[in-house]
Image (cartoon, rainbow, N blue to C red):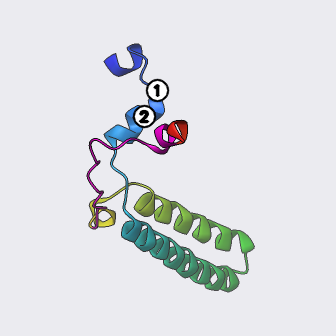
Amino acid sequence: MGNFVSGTPLISYIANKFPSMDYEGQRLAEKCYQWIIVLFGVVGFIWGYFCQQYIQTVYVLGAGVLLATLLVIPPWPMFRRHPLQWQNSRKGRQGRQDKAKTS
């Protein structure tokens, strides 16, 4: 609670608390999400056709969306296996703004 009192915004608190996924993890998460949605959509369509009730299709598809959201949205460790290697900052070199001032 001390972070909120000192003026740190909620967004930066959450961003620092939970690590983000890397690009390969985002690709894997997108593929998983698409496969789960398509699978549940096909199963839901078959089940709804069998029951002759469209609402059953919607229920199965909704369960698929909920499952896919719970599996994909949090940054699970399987989505953080390839972290980016950032370059070290260069000391003694000014930014573009300082170069523009001297010209």
Start-end of magenta stretch: 82-99
Residue 83 % position (x, y): 29, 62
Q: Main secondary structure of the magenta part?
A: loop
Q: SS at mark 1?
A: loop
Image quadrant in which you'd find residue 63? bottom right
**Residue 1 visible to the viewer:** no
Res 12 label: 2
Name which residue type carries label 1.
Pro
Residue 52 located left or right of residue 95: right
The CA distance from mark 2 to mark 1 is 6 Å
Residue 69 % position (x, y): 49, 60
Quarter of the figure with the C terminus: top right
Residue that carries the numbered disc 1 in the rendered image: 9
Name the residue at 65% across, 82% down. Answer: 45
Return the residue found at the far top: 5
Q: Is residue 77 above or below residue 2?
A: below
Depth check: give the residue in front, 69 or 79.
Answer: 79
